[in-house]
Image (tube, rainbow, N blue to C red):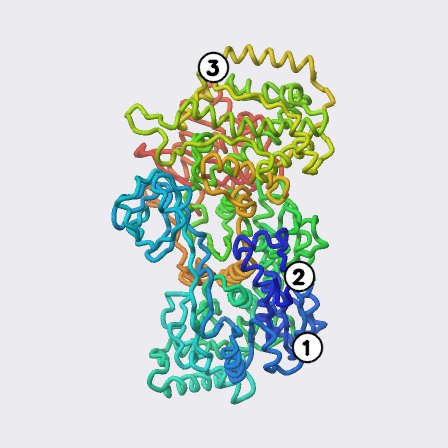
Amino acid sequence: MDSNGTTVEVDESLYSRQLYVMGREAQKRMAKSDVLILGANGLGVEVAKNVILAGVKKVTLKDTNSCKWEDLSAQFYLTEKDIGKPRAKSCIEKLAELNRYVKVCCIEEEITPIILDQHNVVVLIDVDLKNQIEIDDYCHEKGICFISADVRGVFASVFCDFGLSFYVSDKDDAPASSCLVCSVTQDNPALVTVMDDNRHGLETGSIVTFSRVEGMVELENRTFIVTEKSPYSFEIDIDSTHLKPFVSGYVNEIKQGLNVSFKRLRDAILDPEPIMETDFAKFNKPGLLHQGFRALHEFKSKYDFLPEPGNASNAEELINIAKFINSNAKEGEFKCEDIEKEDSINTLKALACTSRGIVSPMCALIGGIVGQEVLKACSGKFMPIKQWLYFDSEESLPDLCKGGVMPPEEVQPQNCRYDGQIMVFGKTLHQSLLKQSLFLVGAGAIGCEMLKNWALMGIGSSSKGSVRITDMDHIEKSNLSRQFLFRKNHIGKPKSVIAAEVAKSMNPDMNIIPFELKCAKETENVFCDEFYENLTGICNALDNVEARLYMDQKSLFYKKPMFESGTLGTKGNTQIVIPYMTENYGASRDPPEKSIPVCTLKNFPNQIEHTLQWARDWFEGEFTQTVNDAKSYLTNQHFESTLPAQPNLKLETYKKIEFTLIDERPKSFDDCVAWARICFQNMFYNTIAQLLHNFPVDSVTSSGTPFWTGAKRPPIPLVFDPTDPLHLAFISSASNLRASIYKIENNFNTDYILSSLERVLVPDFAPADGVKIAVTDAEAKENRENGSAFGDPDLQCKKLVQKLSEAVPFGSNVDIDPIEFDKDLDEHMVLVASASNLRARCYKIPEADIHKSKLIAGKIIPAIATTTALVTGLVCLEIIKFVQEKPLEAYKNWFLTLSVPYFTCSEPLPPTSQTSVIKGKEWKWSAWDCIDVDKGDMKLSEFFDLMKDEYGLEVSMVSYGVSMLYSFFGDKRKIRRRMDMTMTEVIKDVNGVDVLPSQKYLIFEVCAMDIETQDDVDIPYIRFKLQK
C-alpha cells in the first residue's frame, strides 16, 4: 500500500526486464517514492528520464533558467524553439510521456522546507555549494535522501547523503545462493560440502537455512552462520555429532541487510575520504578533482560566472583558488598532496576551460550513475555511493589542449546547437564528428541511447556523414521501460524506423537511414562491400554473442573500428576495437555456457534449471516440432527425405505424426482435457514409476555403492489431485494450448474442466520389463542411435506410413497450427512453469514461481535504463578518441557494476601477432592483416604465378568458405581443367552457384610452402578484389 492506504500494483508486462534487477518489493517501494530534481540541464534531464522510466511515483522538476544554445548539446528534450524559455517547463511534457504510471510536474517557486518534506529524494544539479549545504543540512536532519551532481566538460562530481542510518536491504545484485548439498559431517562444527559442479558463493558470516533434508532432519527450520572453508565447503555453527547421517538436501542463503551511515555535505566536503575510485590508473585524480570542484564553486561565487573557454587567466585564477583551499586545510581536513605537480596544474586548467561546456556522453554516463543512486534511495536496494565519486575523461580532449587550455578561437561559441560541445572539444573536432558515417547494429535499449547521444553530438549530420541503423524486431510493451525513444502508440512498429524518426526530431540535420534486416549472410546483398567501405565505424547494440562475432568478422575484413558494449542488470561492459591497434572482439571471449547433460534432464534432475529446461523442451516438442512435422508430412511430397537417417528416430517422428493426425486428434475441448490428463499421468507418474522399477530406492551399482546418491535423488510419482492448484494449472493450460493447435474454442472455466476430468479414463500403470533407461550421456546417445527394442523399426515405419496414407493422405486439409514458445505470453509460461514445478515436486527440488521460471526458461537478460545510459556514454567518449586517432593508451575498456557500486577499466590489448618468413624476410601479421590481390578476376594458374612471383610461395591448397577449390592431391584432370578457369568460374564449377555481381571481394584460405626451403608458411587469408 502507498501512503494513502491503496495497494501498489506493478505492471509486470512493462517492467518485466527491470523486475529481474530490482525485484518486486523494491519496485513497489519505488512506486511510492516522490523525487525532486533541481536542475534541468543535460544531466538533469538524463537523471529525470532514467528515474521516470524506472517507475517512481512522482518526479518534480525545478529549473527556471532560460534555455541557451549550449544546452542543446546535451538536453535532448529542448529544441532551438526553446531558446530563451525556462528549461524545466520546456521539457516537462516530453518527460511525462515516458511512463504513464509516473506523475511528472515542474515548480517555479523557491525551495522551502515544506516542499522538501513532500519528497523522499532530492537531487541537485548545477546548484551552488552554499545552497547545496543548506538543503543537505535539512534533508540530513529529516531523513530525506540527498544527491548532488555536476558535469563540467569531461569532468564530473557526484555526492550522496542518505542520512545517519539508511537501511540497505540487499547490498549487491548477486542472487541468493542455493546449492544441492553433497554431505554434512557428524562433527562440531559440522562441515558442509556442496556438489562440485557449483561453487556455494558464500562468505564467512553469511546466513543459511536447509530445505528438503533427508537424514539429518534437525537442520530444517533453523538458521546457521557460515564459516567459509573453500569454494565448495563451509562450516555451520552446530554440533552434529549425535545427529542422523545426512542423506540429501539443499542449502539456501538468506541475504542480510545492513544500516549505512552518511556524513553531512558540510562535513564531507572537508573530510571526503575515502573517495570512490573509477579509474585506478588515476589514483590521485579524485582528490585533485575534489579540490578543483570546490575551487569552481568558489570561482562562480566570487565572479558570478564560470571560467571562459580558452581563457588562460580564468584558468590561472581557478588554480590559485584551488591552491588556497588546499594550503589552508586545517588539521584533520582533506589536503591534496599532488596539487603543485605539472600534471595536476594542467588538469585544473582543463577543468576550468571546459567547465561551461556540457556534452552528451558525460551526461549520459553520470545520468546513469545518479539515476541508479536515486533508485537506491527510493528502494533501499543496493549499496549507495559513500559518499563522493569523481569521473574524468581528460584523455578525450584534443591535442590542441596544450597545458590544459585550448586556443580561444577553437572553443568560442558559434550560436548553434553544438556550442556546449565546441566549448569542450573545439570546432575542429566537432567538424570531424559531423562527417562520421557509423553503422549502428541494433535499435534496442543500447541502440536508443546511442542514437540520442549521436544526435546531440552531431554524428552523421553533415553532407559527408551519415548514420545507418538496422534492427529486424518490432516494438513490444516490455521495451518501453528502457528503450526510451519508443511510446505506447509505437507498439508493433519497426524499432529501427521509429528510433530513426525520433532521433531525427532531436536533430533534424542528422542523416539517418533505417533498415529492418538482420546482419547475416543472407543480407549481404544489402550490407555489401560498398556499404561497409563507406563507413567510418561500426557500433554494436546487440544482445547475443553470435551476432557480435559476425560483426567482428566485418570489422576485421573491412578494417573498421568496432565499438562494443553490453549490459546485464546493473552490470555493464564496453570494448573498443581499433584496426591494427587492438585485438578484435573474437580474440578473447567468455567460455561457452555450460550445457545440462541429457541424462540429467531426462532422468536425474537436481536443480530447478534442469526441470525448466525439460519443460521447455517438452513444450517445443509437443506444440511446435510435432505439429510442424505433421504439417510438413501433409504438404511436402519429399517429407521422408528430411527425416533423420537413424531408423528409431524416423520411427519416433512417424509415431508422433500418427498421434497428431489420427489417434490423438481432438474433436472437442473435452478431448483436449483428456489428452492433458493422460500427459500428466505419463509425465509425472508413469515415467517416474518406471524409473523406480528399473532402479529401486535401495539399488546399488556394480561397485556396491548406492545408486541413488549425490546428485541422483530418488523421485516420487505424483498422484493426480484435481484440488491441487498446480495440478489444475497444468491441465488447464495444456488443454487450452492443445485446443488452439486444432482451432477448437478455448475454455478456461475451472468448473467445466473439473467436470470434464471426471469423465477421463486413466489406464493403470504397469511397469515394463526390458526398458533401457540411460544413466549417462553415452548411454543416452547409444539408445538414440540403436534401433527399436521392439521389432524392426523400418518395418514399423512402413506400416505407419501406410496407415497415415489411408487415413490422412498427402494434401489432406487438416487445419492445424504449431505454437512457438513465447516467454512473454502468460499462457505459455503457466504451462512451462507448472510442468517444471510438478517435475521438481517429483524430485524434491525447491519450486520456482512464474517470475523466476520466466527468467530461466525464457533466458531473459535483466535490464535497466540506468546501466544502458552509462555504457553508451562511455562508448561515445571512445568514439571521440577514435575520431582524433588517439594512441592505444588513451582508450579504455570498461567493466562496472552500479549495484555495489564498482568501476574498473583497462587499456585494450594489442592484437596477437605471428611471424612468417616471406622471401627470406620476417613478416609479423595479426588477425587484422590479409594479402590483398587487386588485379581483377584472374585465372587460377595466374593466381598461382602471382603467389610464386610476389611472395615466393608454392600453393598446395585453396579453399573458398567450406569448398575446396584446389588441392595438390586432387583429381588431376579437374586440376588441369580448372587452371584455365577464372577464380569465379572455379567457384561456380565447385559450388554450382554464380558469384553475385554485386560482390566486390572473394576470400580465399591458402596453404602454401616456401619455394626455396619447402617449409610450410602460415599466411593470412587472401582478399581477392574482383574489379580492378
Which residue is pictured at 56% across the width and 48% down the height? 851
Q: Distance between the residues labelled 3 and 2?
A: 61 Å
Q: Residues within 10 Å of mark 3 (few under 14, many from 20)?
A: few
Q: Which of marks 2 and 1 is nearer the N terminus?
A: 1
Q: Tell me which amino acid carries mark 3.
A: Ala
Residue identified by numbered label 2:
101
Q: Nearer the viewer, residue 442 or 175?
A: 175
Amino acid, disc 2: Tyr
* Mark positioned earlier in the residue sequence (1 or 3): 1
- Mark 1 vs mark 3, CA separation in Å: 82 Å
Task: Kindly identify which residue carries mark 3.
Answer: 789
653, above or below 602, in the image:
above
493 or 575: nearer the eye? 493
Q: Which residue is drawn at 41% across and 56% down?
A: 908
Give residue 1009's quadrant in the image: top left
Q: Marks 2 and 3: in contact by CB < 8 Å?
A: no
Crowd rating for badge 1 (residues with CA inside 10 Å; few <14, some 14–19, many 20+)? some
Q: What residue type is labelled 1?
A: Pro
Q: Which mark is residue 909?
A: none
Q: Name the residue under label 1.
A: 86
- Local SS, label 1: loop
Relative to residue 813, is residue 534 depicted above or below? below
Relative to residue 147, is residue 269 drawn left or right?
Answer: left
The percent position of residue 425, horizontal first and vertical second, equals: 53, 70
Residue 537 vs residue 872, the one in the foreground:
872
Query: Closer to us: mark 2 or mark 1?
Result: 2
Q: What element carries label 3?
A: loop
Q: Image quadrant for the N terminus? A: bottom right
Figure check: 554 above or below 25: above
Question: Could you tell me which residue is drawn at 33 percent across and 26 percent down?
Answer: 700
Classed neighbour count for the residue bearing mark 2: other residues with Cα under 10 Å, few (<14), some (14–19), many (≥20): some
How far from the left and from the top, in percent, is residue 200? 37, 48
